[in-house]
Image: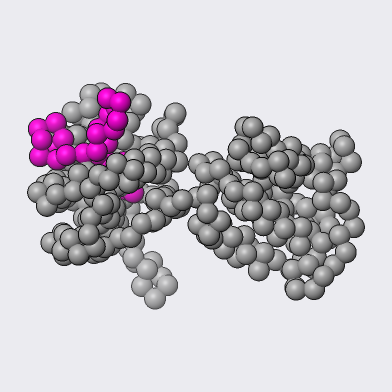
Amino acid sequence: MGFVISNSQSAFLKGKFILDGPMVINEVIGWCKKNRKQTFILKIDFEKAYDNVNWNFLLESMVQMGFPSKWISWTRGIMSSARSSVLVNGSPTFEFQCGKGLRQGDPISPFLFLVVMEVLSCMIDRGVEVGVLNGIKSPDEGPTISHLLYADDAIIIGEWSKVNIENVVRILRCFRICSELKINLAKCSLFGLGVESVEIEEMAYIVRCSVGALPFKYLGVIVGANMNRVSNWKSVYDVFDARLSKWKSLCLSIGGRVVLIKSVLQSLPGYYFSIYRAPVTVIKDLESKIKKFLWSNTEGRKSMHWVNWDRVALPKSKGGLGGGGVALNKEKLGFSAKSQRVVWPLVEYC
């Protein structure tokens, strides 16, 4: 699969990561803003993507990619063996054979879907090659970026022009006819950089999609925002608060709270910390929420902090609670000298 799937797809394969897409989008948005380059970003929504895949289209794509005939016949057998039934008043009806779609939960289905999406990737690349679609040419003789795919989460990027966007819609329509993957344009979003809002609205009306505004969420991460501002970390704060609101710390032992902190709270912001460097204020705020939960201060009343936090964050071998805290390195992380102290291991994700 690694030899036939292009670099524009970043799902399910070795050496490819879910955060590749958000990272590239951030760099493209930052570069276009800096150089005042008019750009469009089309965020695509597929309607029940796995359920609508045309089997003949998928198998023919595998033939074109060079898969052996025996492997293709195995794949056909796996897909044709699927059976479904409909729930009527909570009771399943008789089973019937499926005629299209991929079974969700089948270990091979994600990889087969990559083959389907690779056709869309090749169509867009071909459009860029023949000049009907103009992507974003990266500086210093870098590659042209025209699309990013993660399974059925797709983003198409290009220079802002009516002809350019209309050609994208034509490519998507051709892909739909071939693969039977219906694109829900009503849930698609069109973003414009360096373009008047009126012009974006007019183009969105032609495409029949909604108008998007920066920043926006892609693969669970906010892109196009200045993450040096604490206000843009609100989504991480909200996730923390949502979890803490469901837990009653007064009903838990100190050991139970430590387990929840180490197994849940520490991992919640890790996704954001993998791509963005967190401001010191964000680290302190999240650390403060953990402190309040640890010392049973979640109901608005003050409680005694029996042990100094620097001591709590130490590993068990040094008398702490096994947090494995680390010292901040201001030269490495770019933080101020005030933040150089032992903290909860959240900082390890920075």
The answer to whether residue 226 is above or below residue 7 is below
Residue 55 appears anywhere in the view? no
Q: What residue is drawn where x is 25% and y is 44%?
A: 37
The location of residue 47, given as percent across then percent down, is 27, 58
In front of the other: 69 or 17: 17
The location of residue 75, given as percent across then percent down, is 29, 35
- Please say whether residue 314 is one of the residues in the magenta stretch: no
Q: Is residue 305 left or right of residue 123?
A: right
The location of residue 282, given as percent across then percent down, is 62, 53
Quadrant in which the N terminus is drawn: top left
In front of the other: 343 or 47: 343
How many discs appear?
Answer: 0
- Which residues make up the magenta segment? 127-153
The image quadrant of residue 16 is top left
Q: What residue is drawn where x is 82% and y is 54%?
A: 255
In front of the other: 246 or 161: 161
Residue 211 appears anywhere in the view? yes
Q: What residue is drawn where x is 58% and y is 47%?
A: 278
Q: Is residue 171 left or right of residue 268?
A: left
Q: What residue is drawn where x is 64% and y is 41%?
A: 335
In front of the other: 124 or 253: 124
- Please say whether residue 145 is one of the residues in the magenta stretch: yes
The location of residue 140, given as percent across then percent down, is 30, 26
Quadrant in which the C terminus is drawn: top right
Q: How is the image coloured?
A: one colour
Q: Is residue 177 left or right of residue 109?
A: left
